[in-house]
Amino acid sequence: MSLRPLKTDIDIDELLSGATEVIGREALEKKIRAGKRLVVKHGVDPTARDLHLGYAVNYQVMRRFQDAGHQVVLLIGDFTSRIGDPTGKDKTRPQLSNEVIEANIESMLKQVGKVLDTESLIVRRNSEWLGKMDLTDFLRLSTHISAARLWEREMFKRRLAAGSPVFVHEFLYPIMQGYDSYMLHSDVTVNGSDQKFNELMGREIQEVYGCEPQSLLIMPILPGTDGVEKMSQSLGNYIGLCESPDQQYGKTLSIPDALMRDFYTLCTRIPASEVSRIFTELENGGDPMAVKMRLAREIVTQYHSAEAAAAAEARFIQVHRERAVPEDVPELEIDERPIWICEVLRRAGMVKSGGEARRTVEQGGLKIDGEVVTDATMELKDAGEYLLQKGKRHFLRLKLK
């Protein structure tokens, strides 16, 4: 493990850029100025196999701490994921099997390296201590936590009002997450606003054990490409860290203009001062499309390369500005008729599920030979070749025999 030289004269506003709230900022600044190498924690339950830019909002901040010479710890909640974080959920989360948890962890660790320096990153699992914790120790800890404090959680109040159950294991989840902060001796935790309650519990538990409470960097929840809901695979409004350069580039250009500054701040490594300059020029008559295309290049460059970003941009210009069909359209041959159009999309890998295929068609996101199709029950019955276009970026030559 190789840490970078510690920097004490850094621009703290730049270091904390994008945070909506910094709890314990004064103590954090004092530690940095005093030359303490901070333990910077980010905890995540491995509930997803594929990561998107919403996850990476936290990783961008963690990378800045790494570059400043601090010790960043990625805490994998392999124990707590067996319980399921109740945060923001109006019903109990399904509990994951060990097999699913391990597969998710393996996939996640491959992807975080696209942002974080894995040479200096420490990866820990909370099963290391929670899996071994004596019941007596847990009960002793619980005597310091007020039940009234736990009932302050809004989602628990909503469930009670709706007559829905709150199970004991969910009630204890914040205590376990808070205990993670004590065990890692974290100086600062970086996490989304949905985790604020749990991380405040970490401050309380550190004080129970006589430790200085951690500071909290509360990061916003990144909106999806639709500009309405939070970024999510299940909603189809995400930009995946492992998606192709063309997908990342095209999806970035599809975000509403009003979100561009948030994406620059939260999803790129461009300094805050440069972001301010970009948007000052935009407000003074700059070209919004040029600004958005730069954003798309920055994102593709980070997750692939500058060469991949330039190539994706060239293909985008060819297809969309010149209204041309790209030369390298993938082909799919199917010796089966009639065939449901949603099944074609699924087999071609243009969607992940039949449900996503239905939504794509019903929302007018599919063209066949240049004509918009909105009937999700449509079947292709005649032999021949069809040109399918999903959205603005995905083409397929379908050959039915």
Image: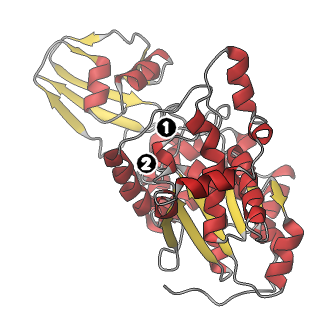
Question: Dividing the picture into quarters, in which one does residue 278 lie?
Answer: bottom right
The numbered dot on residue 244 is none
| Residue at screen point 26% across, 11% down | 379
**Residue 197 locus on image (x, y percent):** 74, 46
Q: Which residue is mark 2?
A: 50
* Amino acid type, callout 2: Asp
Question: Dividing the picture into quarters, in which one does residue 304 lie?
Answer: bottom left
Depth check: give the residue in front, 33 or 246. Answer: 33
Question: Dividing the picture into quarters, in which one does residue 181 lie?
Answer: bottom right
Q: Is residue 288 visible?
A: no
**In the depicted structure, whether residue 260 falls above or below residue 63:** above
**Mark 2 surroundings within 10 Å by alpha-carbon count, few (fewer than 14), some (14 through 19), many (20 or more):** some
Q: Describe the element under mark 2 as helix, strand or loop.
A: loop
CB atoms of marks 1 and 2 within 8 Å: yes
Q: Earlier in the sequence, mark 1 or mark 2?
A: 2
**Residue 321 locus on image (x, y percent):** 53, 41
Q: Which residue is outermost to the front? A: 136
Inter-mark Cα distance, 1 to 2: 8 Å
Q: Which residue is mark 1?
A: 233
**In the depicted structure, whether residue 294 falls above or below residue 94:** below
